[in-house]
Image (cartoon, rainbow, N blue to C red):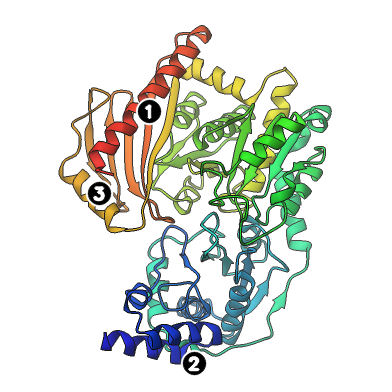
Amino acid sequence: MTDLLATARAWAAADPHAGDRAEIEALVDAGDATELQRRFTGPLTFGTAGLRGPLRAGPAGMNAAVVSRAAAGLARYLTDTGQGGRGVVIGYDARHRSDEFAHVSAAVLTGAGFAVSVLPRPLPTPVLSYAVRHLGAVAGVMVTASHNPPQDNGYKVYLADGAQLVPPADREIEAAIAAIGPARDIPLGDDWTTLGDDVEADYVAAVVRALEPGRVDATARRRLVVAYTAMHGVGSATTQRVFEAGGFAALHCVAEQDRPDPAFPTVAFPNPEEPGAVDLLTALADRTGADVAIAEDPDADRCSVVVGGRQLTGDEVGVLLGDWLLRRGVRGTYANSLVSGSLLGTIAGAHGAPFEQTPTGFKWIIRAGSAAAPLVFGYEEALGYAVSPSVAHDKDGVSAALAVALLAAELAVDGRTLTDRLDELAVEHGLYATGQYSVRVEDLTLISGAMTRLRAQPPAQLLGRQVEVVDLQHADPPLDAVRLTGEGVRVIVRPSGTEPKLKAYLETVVPVPDAAGLPAARSQGTDQLDRLREEMATALGL
């Protein structure tokens, strides 16, 4: 306890933010060992999407001192790799303290000699990814916790390619952060540039240019009725501009969720995947007779789709978009993550297109392809899609929303819908039913314990079929995941990289003899997914 109090006092003495400093001092004065342990057991580390954690003082939270040291570590890394003094662009969402953390980062990076540009207001993450390459910057910072709960914030770092960090850069930046001295001693500058609206306008134009809406009948575009929600995030204005430029009628927006609100008052979790998150959107779609309904997450890098009252899975949307681009003749590499479904690879193979399945995380998906066959489409089952990777080198919910609407309008010309197209693909290739068994925990040791049990005693069968077990800790790169595969069945288990969850990704393939056999196949697929959930719950002990 004596050492813990000394560590906390030292941190508070070096904290440049009066409010954060007072927060630690109050815990020290109260002798709150439990809370101090929670905040000082270790610093936040770079995970799937950079730093992310709860807003609280101390090294295990998102606060001004942690952000200052992260920015200083990034500056040191860039300088040590020969990129000192060049441009860095910073964006931020509308969460609590996001604008403050953006400006703290700008002050630190400017003090380190970089030419810093800050986006003019809260904007979608894909705008920042676009801006990095558009402005020729050597790095970008996005202050966002994406779809995490309201009490969280985060810090994504992009390098010159506009993509999220991968090893070894993430480890090297983390080491540079660890070598930074007290946050109060970091030099600061104040002559950064605040950008105007032209970067967002250029992004909008680039998205529309990449997706070529003119290839879809103009009347069909204008007639398509689209319901939309920003889920209290920053996507609405940019998305509406993209749809207007793409020739669509005005979106029907969920009024209660259209303006940024860091409290996210109408949803338990601001994540379109969570139960109930799209209820207001679905109700609006019913009232307006919408052909398609689209929800973006709070930083608009992901989107969810509802058709006829049914929320499509990320795999279903990914397959629809990949199939659409292939039928458009878009040539290059198609990719998804290893926890995503297998159908995209089957469809790409049928078109003779290269396909790659990558490690989990969009930082890997976006790097798929080659000089001869660059990435033209990638997706992850967690509602992330890159339909125009030449624009944003990351997942992009805004461009994906436009692509979904273009596909829906194209199908409407023949009186078909997105679900009709899914049926056609099932008849052609078989029904690929995917789902999840997901457990949210307070105690992270429950996750590590479940993974240990699974590795020690994996099930020999799933759905009555023998399975092969592969521990992906031994893959390249190593992944904290276990894959179980058998004939027409696959399960991959891994801890979430962004939330306190353990996830089992489920897939079963059901043959479909013809269109008349679809209802029975869908029922069979649903039953098999339910059985897989039960079997994995038993195997994991959660």
Residue lying farthest front?
30
Q: Circles 3 and 1: CB distance less than 8 Å? A: no
Q: Residue at x 43, y 55 (%)?
A: 499
Q: Which residue is mark 1?
A: 529
Q: Quadrant of the N terminus?
A: bottom left
**Distance (Cα) linking label 3 and label 1:** 21 Å
Q: Position of residue 207 (x, y in %)?
A: 70, 47
Q: Nearer the viewer, residue 89 or 220?
A: 220
**Could you tell me the amino acid type at mark 1?**
Leu
Please rate how many residues cluster around mark 3, counting C-alpha atoms within 10 Å: few if below 14, some from 14 to 19, many from 20: many
Rendered location of residue 377, percent (x, y): 55, 41
Q: Amino acid at mark 2?
A: Asp
Disc ID at residue 456: none
Q: Element under label 3?
A: helix
Q: Nearer the viewer, mark 2 or mark 1?
A: 1
The span from disc 2 to disc 3 (Cα, nearest Å) is 42 Å
Left or right of 211, for residue 360: left
Can see residue 401?
yes
- Residue lying farthest to the left in this orientation: 456
Q: Position of residue 136 (x, y in %)?
A: 64, 66
Who is closer to the viewer here, 330 or 51? 51
SS under mark 2: helix
Q: Residue at x 73, y 69 (%)?
A: 120
Q: Residue at x 29, y 23 (%)?
A: 487
First in sequence: mark 2 or mark 1? 2
Q: Position of residue 344 (x, y in %)?
A: 48, 31
Is residue 406 visible in the rendered image? The answer is no
Q: Which residue is mark 3?
A: 451
Q: Nearer the viewer, mark 2 or mark 3?
A: 3
Location of residue 462 by image quarter: top left
Label annotation for residue 185: 2
